[in-house]
Amino acid sequence: MRVSFTVNGRPQQADDVWEGESLLYVLRERLGLPGSKNACEQGECGSCTVRLDGVPVCSCLVAAGQAEGSEVITVEGLAEYARQRSGDALPGAADGAGPHTGEGAGLAPVQQAFIDAGAVQCGFCTPGLLVAADEMLERNPDPSDADIREALSGNLCRCTGYEKIMDAVRLAAARQAEGA
Amino acid sequence: MDFLRPASWEEALAAKAEHPTAVPIAGGTDVMVEINFDHRRPEYLMDLNRIGDLYAWEVGEDSVRLGASVPYTRIMENLRAELPGLALASHTVASPQIRNRGGVGGNLGTASPAGDAHPALLAAGAEVEVESVRGSRRIPIDDFYTGVKRNALAPDELIRAVHVKKADGPQQYSKAGTRNAMVIAVCAFGLALHPRTRTVRTGIGSAAPTPVRATAAEEFLNAALEEGGFWDNGKVITPSVAKRFSDLCSAACNPIDDVRGTASYRRHAVGVMARRTLTWTWESYRGARRATEGAA
């Protein structure tokens, strides 16, 4: 079957999609967006987290057909999404590679914070954590530690880097508050 | 496999009548795992996401009509006052990502003994509204679970909503697991005080082939509370009464040993959770009584 939806602001169409295929598979294998990671395939690890019509979900638990007509944001679109949210235009956003694949789009503040805080070890859980953390900071600009833990409770890191991840989200929140 | 995308409830019922083997999918928490792991290859997959009615809830006089697909996140945010037990149970479901898509209809459809919503529904009192092209009916929650992952639905029926009694007293929910998030219950317990009828209802999860009520424990406690005039005098529940209630709740279990826990652990833990939830709810009832009396 054919599935049409918007990914990172750009209309996309995937053909010959198997009816039981997940949104995650379509993103990675058919649309060339491997940022969302495929690990547990059962909603346990959160590494496939994307935003589906604004809401963080495990894309491995969304049947591709259920995404028909919806808007998806993946980690590749996070920088441009954050930029639009803060009202800044991206220079040269109109050209091909750009924000849809994440190339040349720079980094979202939360991504920069993860780098600065050393919150990335093997990096496999990072895309899911970034999408989840970014959504929480949008909803709750001044989160307590408990809020952060709760928001990220569905994202597993097996390098046990949670403390640095907490640091990164606190840093992103602080920078967001300074910028506001 | 065929992917069915009914745009309305009527279309969904017609599709289910035509293809009774069609597997409904809403939040995907259970169905997608089975497909991803190739444990299930349904002939028809029926997406319910386009049916807006399933995402709505109405607060009525005595009960809340909760659409089958209302996400757990919404229940936690919006129905904590009316359905405190279910809101607490909802908060223990998996992770934010899962709670954003999953709803009670999926828990009921799967009818796993470990489904988080079941003990809360049993304790509050509920009816499941199911429908087919043949008509609509309401199944009392006590008759809904018929076996391990089996429920009272006919092959052509779909779950439309669940009617949950609004709380008329304190409710609690407790779940044993290895951590606070992303955990399938080793066992769970729900308890609701119903001061209006002077009764207590319970629900046990993951400690029998189906979710069950501890009816003998309820009957004992109802009688003991009545006899001691507890509902009127608001006294602390006698430890011996709490102990007997806890033992009877343990006895209502019919658990198995599995990877998550042993049968004897489950029996023990259910007893502990029964005593704790009774204490929490009763203290809250006494507090509310004192506040009312103080104001009078």
Image (cartoon, rainbow, N blue to C red):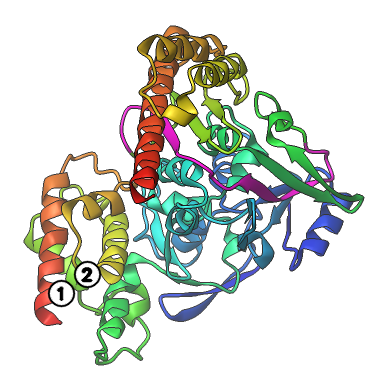
Q: Residue at label 2?
A: A141
Q: What's the distance in space between the residues labelled 2 and 1, CA to CA?
A: 7 Å
Q: Residue at label 1?
A: A176
Secondary element under disc 2, as helix, strand or loop, is loop
In primary-sequence order, the first of circles 2 and 1 is: 2
* Image location of residue B271, percent across then percent down: 43, 15
Secondary element under disc 1, as helix, strand or loop, is helix
**Who's the residue at 40% across and 65% down the image?**
A33
Query: Is residue B177 located in the magenta-colored stretch of the structure?
Result: yes
**Who's the residue at 39% across and 49% down the image?**
B296
Q: Is residue B260 visible?
A: no
The residue lying furthest to the right in this view is B134
| Label 2 with label 1: CB-CB less than 8 Å | yes
Query: Is residue A59 located in the magenta-colored stretch of the structure?
Result: no
Q: Residues within 10 Å of mark 2 (few under 14, many from 20)?
A: some
Number of numbered callouts drawn:
2
The residue nearer to you, when weighing B172 against B90, is: B172
* Residue B82 appears left or right of B122: left
Residue B67 occupies which quadrant of the picture? Answer: bottom right
* Residue A158 appears left or right of B41: left
Number of the front mark, 2 or 1: 2
* Residues tagged by mark 2 and mark 1 found on one chain of the structure: yes
**Label 1 is found on which chain of the structure?**
A
* Image location of residue B16, percent across then percent down: 82, 51
Q: Residues within 10 Å of mark 1 (few under 14, many from 20)?
A: some
* Residue A87 appears left or right of B227: left
Task: Find the magenta span and give its range.
Answer: B153-180
Which amino acid lies under the numbered mark 2 shown in the image of this protein?
Pro
**Label 2 is found on which chain of the structure?**
A
Which amino acid lies under the numbered mark 1 shown in the image of this protein?
Gln
Is residue A67 shown above or below B264?
below
